């Protein structure tokens, strides 16, 4: 169902975010996020002089390299376009995300390392979406592996415990979780029967 009809309005601000998950040749995974803010009008800026309509106010990137356990092996940030000359000085601080594991407590741990004046609001805002993209990318890797082994996604899909009760669909008492658990139990019984 689409959003309701919008009233007459004027576009002023655009924030474009692109996040991609890549399987690397060495088996690690890169999750790369790019964020760009632009305005539809030109305005003055004390560090840059003037920022023209369509010119990036914020142009930033974040890359987390993770292993198959969702542990951050390497992290880096780039701040190509910022409203203040001082902003890019915090980009190297994002390397401190290395060692964190994406899952419960990831955002809290990230805030301890790059929160407040040690980081950048806009790059920190990307971390939740980067984490979600990492989980989706790992799911894609498992799907491809299952297909290579002759199985189907539905046969082997399970709901990670970290997702239980995280939203309406993954309600631990709901129909989707019950269906997945029933399939898992059926697979377990089939495996036991085949082993006899």
Image (cartoon, helix red, strand yellow):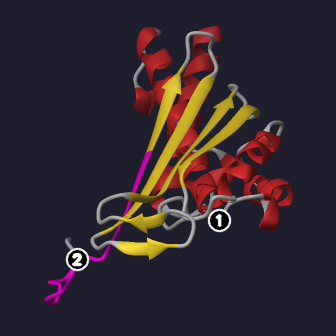
The C terminus, quarter of image:
top right
Q: Residue 47 at x, y = what percent?
A: 57, 65
Reading the image, the residue beneath label 2 is 3
| Quadrant position of residue 1 | bottom left
User: Which mark identifies residue 121?
Assistant: 1
Magenta stretch contains residue 116: no
Mark 2 and mark 1: span between their CA atoms? Answer: 28 Å
Magenta-colored span: 3-18
Q: Secondary structure at mark 2?
A: loop
| N-terminal label among 2 and 1 | 2
Residue 109 is left or right of residue 154, and the answer is right
User: Which mark identifies residue 138?
Assistant: none
Residue drawn at x 73%, y 57% as measured from the top left:
107
Query: Can residue 150 be seen at all in this image of the molecule?
Result: no
Magenta stretch contains residue 12: yes
Judging depth in this view, the residue of 18 and 164 nearest the camera is 18
């Amino acid at each position: 169902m689409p959003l309701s009809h919008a009233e007459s309005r004027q576009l002023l601000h655009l924030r474009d975010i692109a996040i991609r998950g890549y399987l690397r040749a060495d088996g690690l995974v890169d999750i790369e996020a790019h964020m760009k803010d632009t305005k539809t009008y030109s305005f003055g800026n004390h560090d840059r002089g003037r920022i023209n309509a369509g010119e990036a106010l914020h142009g930033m990137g974040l890359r987390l390299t993770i292993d198959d356990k969702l542990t951050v092996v390497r992290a880096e940030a780039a701040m190509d376009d910022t409203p203040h000359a001082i902003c890019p000085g915090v980009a190297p601080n994002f390397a401190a995300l290395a060692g964190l594991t994406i899952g419960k407590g990831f955002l809290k741990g990230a805030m301890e390392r790059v929160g407040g004046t040690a980081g950048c609001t806009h790059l920190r805002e990307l971390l939740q979406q980067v984490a979600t993209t990492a989980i989706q990318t790992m799911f894609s890797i498992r799907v491809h592996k299952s297909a290579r082994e002759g199985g189907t996604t539905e046969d082997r899909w399970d709901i990670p415990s970290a997702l239980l009760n995280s939203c309406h669909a993954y309600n631990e008492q709901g129909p989707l979780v019950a269906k997945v658990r029933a399939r898992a139990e059926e697979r377990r019984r089939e495996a036991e029967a085949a082993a006899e």
